[in-house]
Amino acid sequence: MIPAEDRAEGGGPPARVRRRHVFYVPGYDPRSPRTYFLLFSRELRKFAALHGIAARMRAGKEDPSTHWHIAADWPDSPVETVVDCLSWHEIAVRDFAVPKWRVALLSLRVLGVAIRTGTVVQMLRLNWKFGIFSLYPWAMATLYALAALGLVAAFLALAAALGLHPLAGLVPAALGLFGLLRLTEYLDRRFYVWYLINDWIFTWRHRTHRDPQADTRFEDFARRVADAARDPTLDEVLVIGHSSGSFVAISVTARALELLGEAGREGPRLSLMTIGGNTPIAAAGRPETRTRRAIRNLVTDDRLFWVDYFAPQDVLNFPWLDPVSAFRLDLGGRPRHNPTVRSARFREIFSAERYAELAYRFYELHFQFLRANDRHGEYEFYRFLAGPEPLESVTREPG
């Protein structure tokens, strides 16, 4: 949370929102945008039932896979929202097609860099729970490696016990290793080891400018956000980044503001909401990273309102992250405006039954940020999308 003495006055939000443009940035996910269209459609209906309003969502004619329309009929006035899903799932699909042995070798390099640059140590120092869980995929990968070595040793010993040349055990050992690899892929449906390792590798490429395909995609995202922010018929332009999409959304928003220049003060209110973010993976450690530069710019930019929502129960997000102190940002004497850091308070907005079901299902818990509430609360994802109030008015200081 920004200390009161560090707050600075900037442009205020509109009194009400009638037309909004939302740019949703998913995390590192190989699933197509249709997955999110179906999720948003289903959960919007639940949200509407909770509030006793009519709300509907349809695919746009221009690009139905990523361009959607929401119409919500509130008592005072209807709200129209255009949602652009800034999907980059092709990047994840590309990465998941890389042979696992190459992924394993590259992951060792990435882990070595993360240790050498102090990224791991800083994450552990900032939040031990998140820091330890960030190392979870390598711990599991080590178990897989030990199982592979044990399998090879067992087949070689069996060949020797049968009086065969020890190398005769290599053929069945190779078949066993292939079976073990397939088993790890099957187990990934529950344990997400290869998924998280690929996520780490992508983040390393992003922070070191080693992924031109992703850079080109994100530059296009920034231009689309900037174009929307020039539309005088809109009341609010809202960028939402979830999970790894949080640091992508930060970079995209910072670049969009660069493209806008002073024109960013004349159009609709521009807001950024990061939810379930794991920003330290992209910003911690040495040397200076693009994410840290983007954060520094957004922290002092009064054209923007930025709120970061976290859930303490979610091991895949980083709670109570004040980026200025965490990354020791030098603001050069400029006044601070962002971000406001808030808890989504899952215990209060979801039923006890749902909360109990998710206690040990960390991946499903991570996606509760995108689910409709069971109870009213400050954090209501679909009110941010389709409600009549701007994000800045909905977000309250804790009482």
Image (cartoon, rainbow, N blue to C red):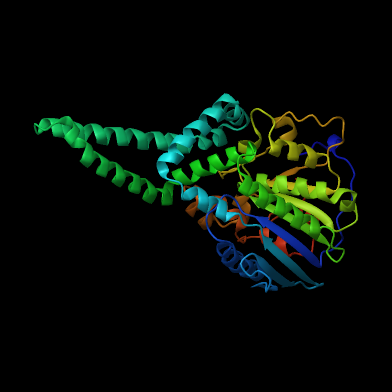
Specify the farthest residue to the front: 212
Rendered residue at 73%/28% (across/down): 328
- Name the residue located 24 percent from the left edge and 31 percent from the top edge: 153
Estimate the x, y position of residue 166 in percent, counting from the top left: 17, 30
The answer to whether residue 51 is visible is no
Quadrant occupied by the C terminus: top right
Tell which residue pokes out farthest to the left in this image.
163
Number of marks present in the image shown = 0
Q: Is residue 41 above or below residue 286?
A: below
In the displayed structure, 147 sits above or below 307; it is above
258 up-or-down from 370: above or below:
above
Task: Find residue 257 and report its horizontal and vertical position in percent.
Answer: 81, 48
Residue at 70% in and 38% down: 290
Residue 44 falls in which quadrant of the image?
bottom right
Q: Position of residue 156 (x, y in %)?
A: 19, 32
Q: Is 86 positioned to the left or the right of 361 in the image?
A: right
Residue 329, by quadrant, is top right
Q: Is residue 27 visible?
A: yes
Image quarter hosting the N terminus: top right
As rendered, which of 224 and 312 lies closer to the eye? 224
- The x and y percentages for residue 240 are 69, 53
Q: Give whichever of 252, 328 is nearer the camera.
A: 252
